[in-house]
Amino acid sequence: MRNPALMSAEELLDHYARQRLSPVEALAAITGRISRHNPSLNAFVVLNPAAEAAAGESTKRWRAGRPLGLLDGVPCTVKDLVDLAGFPTRRGSRLSSEEPVAHDAPSVLGLKAAGAVIVGKTTTTEYGWKSPGDSPLTGITRNPWNPRRTPGGSSAGAAAACAAGFGPLHLGTDGGGSIRIPAAWSGVVGLKPSFGRVPQWPAGAFASVAVAGPMTRTVRDAALMLSAIARFDHRDPYALPDDPRDWREGIEAGVSGMHVALLANHGFEALLDPAGREALEHAAHLFREAGAVVEEVDPDLPDTRTIFGRVWGMALARLVASFPEAERRLLDPGLLEVAASEGRMTASEFLDAESLRLATAHRMASLHRRYDILLCPTVPNPPPLADAPTRDPIRALWKEWAPWTFTFNLSRQPAISLPMALDETGLPRSVQIAAALYRDDLVLRAARTLERMGDILGCATMP
């Protein structure tokens, strides 16, 4: 039997059912790996001291043949933008409260109801504002494939923990690419579900475009985790009606006969380096081999940079204004720069941006009348250096971080980042797949097709 820390959630559950492995043993393998490697990666804000007891209770249930739910005994982490009862939600900020929260967020409730064992809370950039994985509160989180590089953000700790083998399931959030960008740079699977699919509360800084979703090492694990967290919660006024289902159903059906649009741009000229282009072309080739029709398409979108810049800037300006002026110097300087530069607009200008956001969503919906899925890059380049200072963040957003991801937040449709290969420097390269709003099943099905035909990267090579 290989190291339980490197197993998928499905593998662990199979071993539990066969009485070949217990949740206590799986957790021990994972915490041992955390103790060895987390000091150099800095993926965790805090570990959960109750995890061992929870794994013990799960072990008893499996021995009695009465597992609690889909994830009973599977180790999972929670990003520190999401409330976990009994722990503070620090949001990567020195200005956040140190008081423990009283209630679990809806997604955490779903994980606990399914029996998941919460290992701890993972690092985030301050209030989820940027793509490099550092914050004023927790410092720099590093990439397991190469610790000199960032794992990406804002779900930095979740991506690093996933790639390092610190458990199979990790909960991230995504307001402009914060699941998919770190998934791409860390070589793992990152799913941004349709807006409203996974309820959220309390609302964060980017509530109008942000979602919570799975970060895993396999597509099937992402579907499994989605099955636990995509449950209606009355606290979120945008939550979709309850649709209890196992999102793995139909995932192996393939893409034969599907029409795939290879997107040339997102309303502006986005960069893509040669290794990223090679990964994209390989994915298109695999889709064709699987029986899909692939066509390069200009989606004829508005310039989504302008739209997202206003959403991003106004959200951060509102956040900064919520703190006393004397305390604002403790915030990330880049966050303050974006808030000052992009947050100065009239209500009319902001409503104009909202109108353009709806036009983007309308155009995407029209595109999906012809194409089942969309294929494009996730990131334009390999991960930046972890220690590099954040300079000119507004330009970096369009050029280096999120030019291929934020459009799908504006349109609110589901999208997934999938690792394809390692480049010549040994860093992961990924592609992104999107589908029409609420067709999360097609995203998972298409991603599983590529995963099945290609090579799964698994964990970064570490002792």
Image (cartoon, helix red, strand yellow):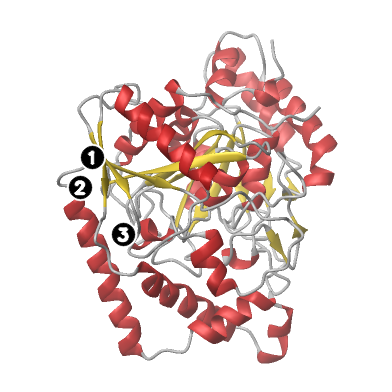
The residue type indicated by label 2 comes to His
- From where the camera sits, is residue 368 visible? yes
Quadrant location of residue 55? Answer: top right
Q: Seen from this angle, which residue lies furthest front? A: 274
Q: Secondary structure at mark 1?
A: loop
Q: Label 2 crowding class (10 Å Cα cut-off): few <14, some 14-19, many 20+? A: some
Residue drawn at 81 percent across, 27 percent down: 463
Q: Label 1 crowding class (10 Å Cα cut-off): few <14, some 14-19, many 20+? A: many
Q: Nearer the viewer, mark 2 or mark 3?
A: 2
Report the number of numbered marks. 3
Relative to 98, residue 337 above or below = below
- From where the camera sits, is residue 229 visible? no
Q: Secondary structure at mark 3?
A: helix
Relative to 112, residue 97 above or below = below
Mark 2 and mark 3 residues within 8 Å of each other at the beta carbon: no
Q: Position of residue 64 (x, y in %)?
A: 58, 13
Q: Residue 411, which numbered label?
A: 3
The residue type indicated by label 3 comes to Ser
- The N terminus - image quarter: top right
Distance Cα–Cα, label 2 vs label 3: 12 Å
Along the polypeptide, which appears first: circle 3 or circle 1?
1
Q: Residue 368, which numbered label?
A: 2
Mark 1 and mark 2 residues within 8 Å of each other at the beta carbon: yes
Q: Residue 347, which numbered label?
A: none
Distance Cα–Cα, label 1 vs label 2: 6 Å
Could you say which is closer to the camera, residue 438 or residue 258?
A: 258
Distance Cα–Cα, label 3 vs label 1: 16 Å
Mark 3 and mark 1 residues within 8 Å of each other at the beta carbon: no
Residue drawn at 32 percent across, 77 percent down: 353
Q: Secondary structure at mark 2?
A: loop
Find disc 1 in the rendering and name its residue: 372
Q: Nearer the viewer, mark 3 or mark 1?
A: 1
